[in-house]
Image (cartoon, grey):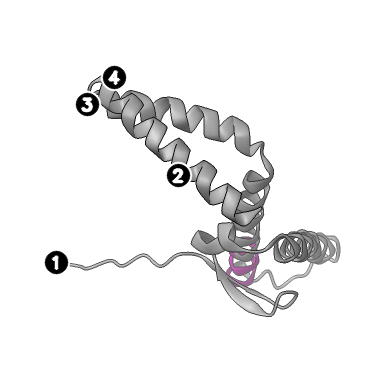
Amino acid sequence: MKLSLSMPLTFNSKQIDKVVTIDDVGSLSNPEVLLLKDELMTAIKSMDDYIKKFKQEKQEKYDKDWHQKVRRKQQVCKAFLSQLISLDHDESLFRSIYDKHFSQIILEYIDRNEFRTIHNKARSLAIAELEKIT
């Protein structure tokens, strides 16, 4: 029996001076997100340019392993960039869709009155917390 532990994708960012896992992208600060996006876009473009240059020179020694490594690095960069871009989408739209599905699932387990009671309590707690912050 083989035990396969998949590790999350990582990116060693020189711009923000840290190794970032794809799972932790959402916890980055806004300046870190901007710097990382810029670094990823630059890396992807550089790799594309390097591959194009290599093909134009029509190197006799085609290194399939090298090409696969570069393509894999590009895929990792694109995965991170895609994750960062998804953070930019309208959070309120996501939240409304999420809330709708969450409510439907909860209502499978409790009745509407219990749901309203829990919903109102959570709302009151959120308002109280916001008042403390502001």
Q: CA distance from mark 2 to mark 1?
A: 49 Å
Quarter residue 94 falls in: top right
Residue 35 in percent (x, y) is at 77, 65
Say which residue label 1 marks. Answer: 1
Amino acid carrying mark 1 in the image: Met
Is the residue marked by circle 1 packed among few (<14), some (14-19), or many (20+) residues within 10 Å?
Answer: few
Q: CA distance from mark 2 to mark 4?
A: 20 Å
Query: Image point 52% across, 50% down: which residue?
Result: 129
| Residue 67 is inside the magenta segment | yes
Query: Image point 28% across, 21% down: which residue?
Result: 113
Is the residue marked by circle 4 packed among few (<14), some (14-19), or many (20+) residues within 10 Å?
Answer: few
> What range is drawn magenta here?
65-72
Q: Nearer the viewer, mark 2 or mark 4?
A: 2
* Between discs 1 and 4, the one toward the N terminus: 1
Amino acid carrying mark 3 in the image: Ile
Say which residue label 3 marks. Answer: 110
Say which residue label 4 marks. Answer: 112
- Classify mark 3: helix, strand or loop: loop
